[in-house]
Image (cartoon, rainbow, N blue to C red):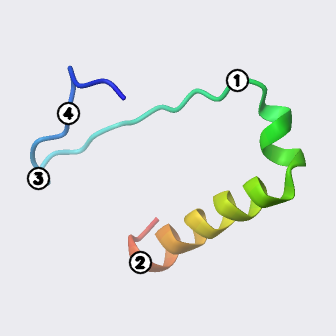
Amino acid sequence: MSTKHKATTTDDCYFMTITVVDWIDLFTRLQQKYIITDALTYCQENKGL
């Protein structure tokens, strides 16, 4: 993770991008699929996503 740019306040809006190489592995491995869907569900329920 870059240490050059960091969100320092909660009053501002920030945009984050993520790059994943070889996406196919992300969606074909069942354990990784569960991690992603669990994280998204958590964000929906607790963080207003």
Q: Position of residue 4 (x, y in %)?
A: 20, 20
Which badge, 2 or 4, comes first in the chain's sequence? 4
Q: Quadrant of residue 3?
A: top left
Task: Tell me the distance, in whole angstroms, between the alpha carbons under discs 2 and 4.
Answer: 23 Å
Name which residue lies at 40% across and 36% down. 16
Kindly report which numbered mark, 3 or 4, lies closer to the viewer in this rendering: 4
Q: Which amino acid does label 3 sit on?
A: Asp
Q: Mark 1 points at which residue?
A: 21
Q: Is mark 3 on a helix, strand or loop?
A: loop
Kindly report which numbered mark, 3 or 1, lies closer to the viewer in this rendering: 1
Which badge, 4 or 1, comes first in the chain's sequence? 4
Tell me if 35 is positioned left or right of 24 in this view.
left
Kindly report which numbered mark, 2 or 1, lies closer to the viewer in this rendering: 1
Which badge, 2 or 1, comes first in the chain's sequence? 1
Q: Where is residue 45 in the image (x, y as percent from the top left)?
A: 49, 79
Q: Name the residue under label 3.
A: 11
